[in-house]
Image (cartoon, coloured by chain):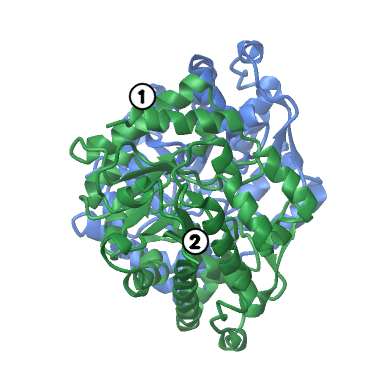
Chain colours: A blue, B green
Amino acid sequence: MSNAPLLNDRLLRALRRQPVDRTPVWLMRQAGRYLPEYRATRARAGSFLAMAKNPDIACEVTLQPLRRFDLDAAILFSDILTIPDAMGLELCFVEGEGPKFKHPVTSEREVARLGVPDMETDLRYVMDAVRASRRELAGKAPLIGFSGSPWTLACYMVEGGSSKNYARIKAMALNQPALLHRLLEINADAVIAYLAAQRAAGAQALQVFDTWGGVLSPAMYREFSLPYLQRIAQELPRGEGEQRVPLVLFGKGNAAHLEALAATGTEAVGADWLIELSEAAQRVQGKVALQGNLDPAVLYGSPDAIRQQVRQTLDSYAQGNNGSREGHVFNLGHGMSPDMNPEHVGLLVDAVHEFSKR
Amino acid sequence: MSNAPLLNDRLLRALRRQPVDRTPVWLMRQAGRYLPEYRATRARAGSFLAMAKNPDIACEVTLQPLRRFDLDAAILFSDILTIPDAMGLELCFVEGEGPKFKHPVTSEREVARLGVPDMETDLRYVMDAVRASRRELAGKAPLIGFSGSPWTLACYMVEGGSSKNYARIKAMALNQPALLHRLLEINADAVIAYLAAQRAAGAQALQVFDTWGGVLSPAMYREFSLPYLQRIAQELPRGEGEQRVPLVLFGKGNAAHLEALAATGTEAVGADWLIELSEAAQRVQGKVALQGNLDPAVLYGSPDAIRQQVRQTLDSYAQGNNGSREGHVFNLGHGMSPDMNPEHVGLLVDAVHEFSKR
């Protein structure tokens, strides 16, 4: 069965730095609790994990925001921690505490036991969700697949969940760097296989979330996060020419490392809101597309404030990119929150298109 | 009654960028729960707030780390939220949730009601703690007084406590910027009066903690945090020449703003660990001293790892400062955590002195 032709290729063109009629926009965590229809689906499914592990429900939730808003991409509804879960760490969610692993990785023996999961058995539910979402989208917009970064996965795997100061993994980085590198190599192998499988299943763009790269000092980032992002950018097979599936390396707190990220071989870099997009664009010098970077909290602002901030973000990019809007994918600098107003999201999406019309 | 002569002036000399025999060192939150004697005092006092509000106990706790370690400064044991507490917001601590205000500031009317507290009545307990600590230190090391920054105080005042995404205050910044500026002006007036009173009571250096400046986009930082830090640096009276009480502007996530901070008129800037000290030193061009910036999590490392990281931090500063170690105060990039090992702290302090001997 072949998929429908893509009717809106703005995202893919912008990620390749090709001209588009208006700047494409999607929002991190656009499929989420701020949508009443999402909450209804979740209530029926029982839990976040039950939703993510059921391909039909994951597909339904992936499409929900595109029914409401004029978004230029869908992003697969899933979790960044599916890989370690499939490695046997057993992911669970404790209300109010975020993700936890029942079996965190704390010793050499536990690292030695880890292996790359089989993508079409252990992680079949993700690939089925990709296939279902791609089919249901019917070419309306491209589907983005994603993964956590090797470092960010390792944070959760070693800490056993969210962390305040990353004591365990930083102690490992300081005291057993070779062990941590072994873990990161396995994670990188798994991420590459995972993203390749999502591409094979139909994902048209791929994003790596290095959510916790920004907790590292520059020296530690260059040792423990960057080389593995580079491996992904170099080794992930993603086709050639117009068939090439573009890769986005997003990282919270990656402002200090934009030049290095632009040199990895990735097609695009995602930035958070702590850097002026004009500066980011100047620093990557047209080597990659940029995705970002409005402070998500702007969605708490009034309609006028949102429109003004959207315009500033678009103009900031152009200012740093020799006056051109090409090579920009509009997004937030981080994910949306459950208490945000859906009407504000629609307004933001429309403002991006209105203000960026060529 | 006059105070004893200062026997260790390394901190003050380094903050003035004068030569010293070795790099001075103190650690943010050096008086804290990682010390058994602190936990014992706290158990007797009943709570953090009871300790901070009792000048004798605050003095005792201020001195505790200096009895164990060869630290070059004491920092007053207190809280950054004493000012809004004295304004009537009523500070309390909920176990596991951090600081809370019983009466957060959410409306124009509530902002209009705020005033600068009287330092020798409403905040007398702080001034008494400064006087007691200065007396007890007996010149062994200088005493640092401190305050939260206007923006950081406003975050807690508007959010009512710690926050995940600063929804309320960012909404105020977007929708009612004039109201937020009124609040920030009052805070700045109060901070200036508070630090001036601490100086009058005997504090020999002063630090402003802009803990949450780093959650702002560059444009919002320049509008809502920086101008008030600048006002403090400009308007806070602190004496002349060798009598001048130096000011340190510390901020988490301030790497993007070092040049601007160095141009405020402050004597020193404190940096977190997300910037290479060599780069920070190059960027401030000798206009200010720099304080920082080891990742606190390094204290979870082995003794060898700690010593190596201390050496790297010292050398990084010198590398960016034309090969000279002058103008550097060694510190962590953020506060210590309760689960840290006191022996590692001693080892770190000694390593700083050993490796920086002129």
* Secondary-structure class at tag 2: strand
Q: Do the residues labelled 1 and 2 touch (CB within 8 Å)?
A: no
Q: Residue A68 in the image: x percent, y percent?
A: 59, 62
**Is disc 2 on the same chain as disc 1?**
no
Q: Residues within 10 Å of mark 1 (few under 14, many from 20)?
A: few
Instruction: Assign the C terminus of chain A to one quadrant of the image.
Output: bottom left
Question: Which residue type does callout 1 highlight?
Answer: Gln
The subunit carrying tag 1 is A
Give me the residue at 59% from left, 62% from top.
Answer: B129
As drawn, A66 above or below A212: below
As drawn, B25 above or below A124: below
Question: Which residue type does callout 2 highlight?
Answer: Phe
Query: Residue tagged by mark 2?
Result: B146
Q: Residue B195 in the image: x percent, y percent?
A: 46, 69
Instruction: Assign the N terminus of chain A to one quadrant of the image.
Output: top right
Q: How crowded is mark 2: few (under 14 residues within 10 Å), some or many (20 or more)?
A: many
Camera sees residue A188: no
- Name which quarter of the figure residue B159 lies in: bottom right
Give me the residue at 51% from left, 43% from top.
Answer: A143
Q: Distance between the residues labelled 1 and 2?
A: 49 Å
Left or right: where B17 falls relative to B148? left
Q: Residue B279 in the image: x percent, y percent?
A: 27, 42
Which residue of the protein is positioned furthest toward the front in this rendering?
Answer: B1
Camera sees residue B320: yes
Left or right: where B258 falls relative to A102? left
Query: Residue tagged by mark 1?
Result: A234
Looking at the rendered image, the disc whose residue lies closer to the viewer, 1 or 2, is 2
Front one among A85 and B99: B99
